[in-house]
Image (tube, helix red, strand yellow):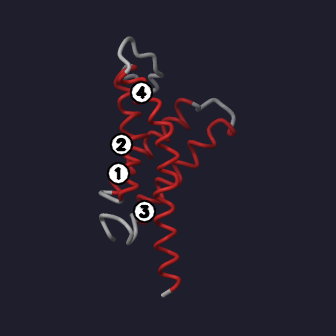
Amino acid sequence: MQKKIFNEVGLLLLRVVPSLLMITHGYGKFQKLIAGGEIKFADPIGIGAAPSLFLAVVSELVCPIIIILGFKTRWAAVPAAITMVVAAFITHGSDPIATKELALLYLTIFVVIIMVGPGKYSIDRK
């Protein structure tokens, strides 16, 4: 019984803490998106600066909020994981490992969330 509770609290912490930290990255991008004027943002996949910024806001602000709530958690973790793949292997592809380390850590966490689900303490309750 106690092991089950620890597992569920562990899944809750795995969802909430990294997602809160990811929101700090997404919020700055959100402010840039709504500020108006010319958008200057990296275009790592060749779709344009504005669409790239919009996708980054969705995956670094909106998806982490959904993950925290535990609603459609596995689906919400997919865009977040994809963004971390782009950050680690495209945007910072030629950089040293220390530069891509944070993106790789987030990627690992979001992949684990995709694999194990949200846990009991979530809207999905699985």
Mark 4, mark 1: which one is toward the viewer? 4
Structural distance between the alpha carbons of marks 3 and 1? 17 Å
Amino acid on which the number 4 mark rests in the picture: Gln
Sequence-earlier tag: 4 or 2: 4
**Which secondary structure, mark 3?**
helix
Structural distance between the alpha carbons of marks 4 and 3? 32 Å
Amino acid on which the number 2 mark rests in the picture: Val
Tag 2–tag 1 contact (CB < 8 Å) = yes
Structural distance between the alpha carbons of marks 2 and 3? 20 Å
Residue at 39% of width from left, 27% of height from top?
52
Structural distance between the alpha carbons of marks 4 and 1? 19 Å
**Which secondary structure, mark 2?**
helix
Residue 34, horizontal then vertical, whole percent: 35, 23
**Which secondary structure, mark 4?**
helix
Q: Choose top left, top right, bottom left or bottom right for residue 45.
A: top left
Circle 2 packing at 10 Å, graded few (<14), some (14-19), many (20+), is some
Circle 3 packing at 10 Å, graded few (<14), some (14-19), many (20+), is few
Sequence-earlier tag: 4 or 3: 4
Structural distance between the alpha carbons of marks 4 and 2? 13 Å
Q: Pointer 1: what residue?
A: 66
Sequence-earlier tag: 2 or 3: 2
Residue at 52% of width from left, 68% of height from top?
10
Amino acid on which the number 1 mark rests in the picture: Ile
Q: Pointer 3: what residue?
A: 115
Location of residue 48 with respect to 65 vertically, above or below: above
Residue 97, horizontal then vertical, whole percent: 68, 39
Residue 35, horizontal then vertical, whole percent: 38, 19
Residue at 36% of width from left, 33% of height from top?
55
Sequence-earlier tag: 3 or 1: 1
**Which secondary structure, mark 1?**
helix
Q: Pointer 4: what residue?
A: 31
